[in-house]
Image: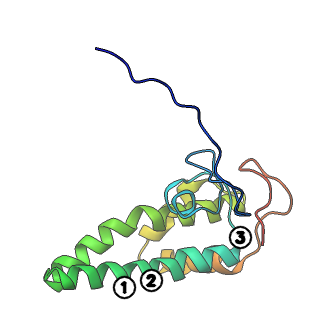
Amino acid sequence: MPSLPERPCTPLPATGLAPDRSWPDGDPDAPWQMLLSPNGRISRKRFWLWGVGAMLALGLVLHGLLAVARVRFSVAEHVVNVLLLWPAVVISIKRWHDRGRKGWWVLIALVPVVGWLWLVLDNGFLRGSRGANRYGPPPPA
């Protein structure tokens, strides 16, 4: 079978935009890195933005899409919870890393009432370790 002739690759004109960084070596602030990769550290601010704000927004969008598709609310609730479970765990793991602790601390959430309270207080309000730790350099603010 004959092969296609190679065409020279011409660069795109300069747009002034940042280069496209793809998974997994890309920008740590890219949504897919932030929501899917448990590596690295995040600040308290990013915990609130991504772990609370983005999760609420994604939940509302998913509920809206499932409502348009006429999926019953009880089924939609389970679907949204399953879809957002891994991103929520990843955000919390990164925050535990910033505190200098292993990601397994995310399991504290399984302790009724006290676990959730501990997770929110520790991840949302306490400062991360100063300087680099075994999980990487300090996160940007």
Tell me whether circle 2 and circle 3 mark residues in contact (CB < 8 Å). Answer: no
Disc 2 residue type? Leu
Give the residue pinned by disc 3.
43
Tell me whether circle 2 and circle 1 mark residues in contact (CB < 8 Å). Answer: yes
Distance of label 1 from label 3 (alpha carbons): 24 Å
Tag shown at residue 56: 2
For marks 1 and 3 on the same chain, the one whose residue lies earlier in the sequence = 3
The way the protein has been coloured in the rendering is rainbow
Q: Is residue 137 left or right of residue 22?
A: right
The spot of residue 103 in percent (x, y) is: 57, 55
Disc 3 residue type? Ser
Please tell me whether mark 1 or mark 3 is closer to you in this view: 1
Nearer the observer, 44 or 76: 76
How many numbered markers are drawn? 3
Tag shown at residue 23: none
Quadrant for residue 46, please give it: bottom right
**Residue in the picture at 50% in, 66% down:** 108
Nearer the observer, 70 or 101: 70
Please tell me whether mark 2 or mark 3 is closer to you in this view: 2
Distance of label 2 from label 1 (alpha carbons): 6 Å
Give the residue pinned by disc 1.
60
Of all residues, the one furthest to the top in this rendering is 1
Q: Is residue 72 left or right of residue 134?
A: left
Distance of label 2 from label 3 (alpha carbons): 19 Å
Q: Quadrant of the C terminus?
A: bottom right
Disc 1 residue type? Leu
> Is the residue 50 above or below the residue 20 in the image?
below
> Is the residue 132 above or below the residue 123 in the image?
above
Instruction: Label 3: state its secondary structure.
Output: loop
